Each structure stands twice: as C-alpha cells, then as structure tokens.
Image (cartoon, helix red, strand yellow):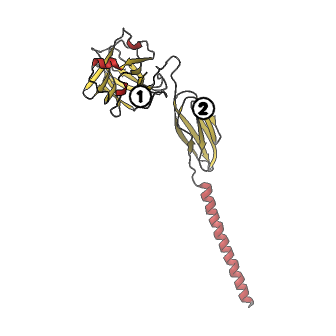
Amino acid sequence: MKKYNSFFKFSICLGFVLALSSCEEKVAKDWETTLFGKGEAMVGTSSTSIDFGESVTFTDLSTKVNGRSWSFAGGTPATSMDSIVTVTYARGGSYKASLSVVYIDNQRETLDTQIEVAGPPPADNPQPTFSDSYAFYTEYSKVGAGTSVTVQNNSGFTISSVADGYEGYEAYEFKFDTSVSWAMASVKPVSAANISKFKDGFYNVALRSTSAGTVELQIRSSGQKALVVLDATSEKYGFKRDGEWHLLEIPMADFLANNANLDLAAITDILVFRSQGTLTGVPFDFDMDNLFVSVK
C-alpha cells in the first residue's frame, strides 16, 4: 500500500512538472511573439483636404511603439512627439506630414501622409466676384465644382508644373521649343463639359508671360472652335507681357462672336494655346492657372 501511494504521489508530481514545463514553454512562446512580433505604422487624420487657416488632427495608431516623432512641412507646429497632435496650415499648398516610429524591437519605420490645403489668392492677385462658377483648373476654394483636366502638347511646347501659381501653389508652364516654327497646346476636360449656362458669363484664366508673340486662346467642341486673339501691344482683357500674373476675365460673348456654332454643351478643349505667324527663334513661353467659367 505504501508503494502504491508513493507511486501515485510520484505520478502526480511528474504530471505537475510536465504541465508546468508546458505552461512555461507556452508563456515563453507567447512572450516571444508579443515582444518580438513586427509592429505596424498607422496614422489617423481628421481630414486630408482643408482650406487655408484650418487644422488637421493626426493620431499615431501604430502598434508596439517605443518612440515616435512627427514632422509637418508647412504646418504649425512643425514637429511633435505626442501621439495625438493638431496642426494648422496657414497657406495653401500640398504638404507632406511624416511619422517616424521606433518599435519595441528598435526597428524603425516612416509613414508619409499627403495634406492638400486650398489657398486664397494673394492680396495682389484678386478674384472676380461671381454668383455661380465651374472649375477646370483652380485651387481657389470659392469656385464651384467642375471637372479635372489633362494637358496635351500638339506642337513646340514642353509642359510642366510650377509651384508659384496665381491663387495657390500649382500652375502649368508651357515652354516653347524655339527650334520649331509654330506652337500649340491643349487643356482638355477628362470628359466633354457642359458650360451652356455660362453663355452670358465669363471665361477666367490667369496668364503670365514676357513673350511678344501673338497668341490665340481657343475653346473647342466637336468639329468647332471659337477664339480670341491676344497681341503684345493692346493689353486686351488686362493681359500684360511683364512676367507677372494677370487674371483675364473674358466675356463668353467674345468667343461666340468668333463662332456662334460652338457647342457649349459639349466642350472638348477648354483652352488651346495657338501661335499666329512664324515663331522660329521667337520666345513663346506662357504660364497658365486659375481656369474657370463664371456668371456674375
């Protein structure tokens, strides 16, 4: 009987030791998984598209974080180490917010978030007053919704973006290759645009140039085009070739006087730059921004 009891006690002890060993192994594995598993960088934002003067709240949602640092280009504050931080953007533009995370295993990772801030026109670049409008290419938040555009080089232009726009921080540069004799480029809605309700309104576009070349500004629908002509001497619609931005407010009636058959309900090209005459060796560079139609 004593031997049986001893064996029974030994079996219980052995079972306890094995169970304890198994628990320790499981705890060790769980601890290893919890401690050394890879963290993940995640950022929450209250918005990614705001007007100038407004704020965005950034939240670090990353896992297994041992330390962090934020940097906010163009924002206030410019840096932070808090998990939640509210950043104010005073000027329009496209800005990058960066979160750098150090995990508990000392691995590092950086995550970028793009913030779009709509900016007002500078004090010396005023906007016209209008009751209704339709946007094609503008960062001015008071212009009504419209459509996005693509740009196309037809002859002689190299087209690129520049940062010092009329009303914000983006504009198009149409730079002429003087080795050819004529120039043409198109700004096209992504699908045909209906601007028929602006028939008695205005065509607004900001231009900047020092070129003395005569340029046609064309609007096109399928099989039709209407245009106005800008020469270097008349300063028509307030355009000056002084290298500064000027907002042209052109009556739609002036385009239709050139061609009354233009179909305003199906516009395929909202702006075509077209040279007149031979341009070989003649500078013909233009910057364009703030393109929309409006009704006063």
Question: Closer to the observer: label 2 or label 1?
Answer: 1
Q: Is residue 103 left or right of residue 279?
A: right
Q: Is residue 269 above or below residue 241?
A: below
Q: Position of residue 87 (x, y in %)?
A: 60, 34
* Element type where label 2 sits in the image: strand
Q: Residue at x 68, y 75 (%)?
A: 16
Residue receiving disc 2: 88
> Of the residues shown, which amino acid type is indicated by label 2?
Thr
Residue receiving disc 1: 134
Label located before the other in sequence (2 or 1): 2
Q: How many marks?
A: 2
* Element type where label 1 sits in the image: strand
Name the foreground residue: 175 vs 142.
142
Most extreme residue toward the right is 2
Name the foreground residue: 95 vs 202.
202
Q: Is residue 289 above or below residue 8?
A: above
Classify the position of the C terminus by image quarter: top left
Classify the position of the N terminus by image quarter: bottom right
Most extreme residue toward the bottom is 1
Q: Is residue 54 left or right of residue 233?
A: right
For marks 2 and 1, give the CA distance.
Answer: 29 Å
Q: Is residue 189 left or right of residue 32?
A: left
Q: Residue at x 24, y 27 (%)?
A: 223
Q: Position of residue 224 (x, y in %)?
A: 26, 25
Residue 296, numbered label = none
Residue 84 makes an appearance in the image? yes
Q: Position of residue 149 (x, y in %)?
A: 38, 31
Q: Quadrant of residue 277?
A: top left
> Of the residues shown, which amino acid type is indicated by label 1?
Tyr
